[in-house]
Amino acid sequence: MIIGILKEIKAEENRVAMTPSGVDTLAQHGHTVLVEHQAGRASGFTDEAYQQAGATLVPTPEEIFERAEMVMHVKEIMPPEYKLLRAGQIVFTYLHLAANERLTHALMDSGCVAIAYETIQTADRRLPLLQPMSEVAGRMSVQEGAKYLEMLYGGRGMLLGGVPGVEPAKVLILGGGVVGMNAAKIACGMGADVTLLDMSLDRLRYLADVLPANCKLIMSSPLRIRERVQEADLVIGAVLLPGAKAPHLITRDMLATMKRGAVIVDVAIDQGGCFETSKPTTHSDPVYIVDDVVHYCVANMPGAVARTSTLALTNATLPYALKIADHGWKQAMQQDAALAKGLNVAQGHLTYQPVADAFNLPCRAALTGPETES
């Protein structure tokens, strides 16, 4: 198979979809790998390293789309690329379609086969391609939150861990999945007063065994969220409904009850955000203030630590990319049920129900099954 590795064009996205080591593995399996000129530069991977690994350098994205049977990105296909897609071409990347109706229609109209990293799901409900970036984002959420608690940025002027004789900041984490667990680890390690809310009692039991003792684990409910946000200095939104739009857990009216200069970090912003007042921001302009509450809603947080993120991402995506390249997408999905859950769009049809539900569109749930109305 001919595989194209594209340079990211989303604002301040510094990751790349494949490392030279990953290219070498694909080449060893007999595949042709095209890498766009300087695609890995921001992550610290030179064109020469890709060439030595067996890649062919390509000067433009147009040529990648024209030649490649499968194109790989980190972030979603961007508007300038929509017209470059073609029928039958495989697109393998993060898509987050439930928060992007325009992209959903562009993929359907193109006739391509769109496989989303974030909806590949194993039998035990793990999201193996989302997990490494969730680990990065969860850990980053605390260090970014700690930064924006500084007065320079409109924060309350609090040190997250306090000092002897002064109480630490109160951190509220909404969601106990991979993001929430990693956020809690870092916040607890920095000495903060940490509370984590989750709706699964089984998950809370597990977290009680793996998180530090200074993390309070509480069953979530709308009332508990409303009560706890009033006390919090830093709130981290870490909820996830796989492939679906995130629910709004903090509404606009709740902001009026929060402390002046409190900070909220919305890690769910790729899926529409879990705070009603959230809107995507960038690394160059990461925060804004609503009702005296600082909002950090960067849509590609791991892009700020591109080398770590690229290495972690390739570790997770390469085995799946290899299956698709070795066997073709249909056979690979017949052999791997987890990979099959990654199929979001196929040859003009939506194939992932949560996305269809988000836009009230018909869904063809199986690879060859009949259409069902959402």
Image (tube, grey):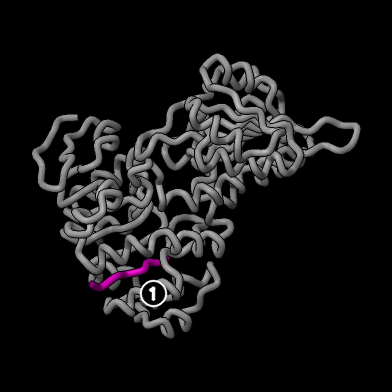
Q: Is residue 113 visible?
A: yes
The answer to if 370 sits in the magenta stretch is: no
Residue 278's spot in the image, x, y percent? 51, 33
Q: Residue at x 36, y 77 (%)?
A: 59
The magenta span reads 1-7
**93, 312: nearer the viewer:** 312
Q: Is residue 187 above or below residue 136?
A: above
Q: Residues within 10 Å of mark 1 (few under 14, many from 20)?
A: many
Q: Is residue 120 above or below residue 155?
A: below
Left or right position of 272 against 359: right
Q: Residue at x 57, y 35 (%)?
A: 207
Residue 57's spot in the image, x, y percent? 37, 80
**50, 175: nearer the viewer:** 175
The answer to if 4 sits in the magenta stretch is: yes
Residue 13's spot in the image, x, y percent? 49, 58
Can you say which quadrant of the picture contains the N terminus?
bottom left
Q: Is residue 289 visible?
A: no
Say which amino acid is labelled 1.
Val
Left or right position of 82 against 278: left
Most extreme residue toward the right is: 165
Can you say which quadrant of the picture contains the C terminus?
top left
Label 1 residue SS = helix
**Snapshot quadrant of residue 256:** top right
**263, 140: nearer the viewer:** 140
Left or right position of 162 against 22: right
Q: Residue at x 83, y 30 (%)?
A: 167
- Residue corresponding to mark 1: 23
Q: Is residue 5 above or below residue 334?
A: below
**Snapshot quadrant of residue 358:** top left
Residue 9's spot in the image, x, y percent? 43, 60
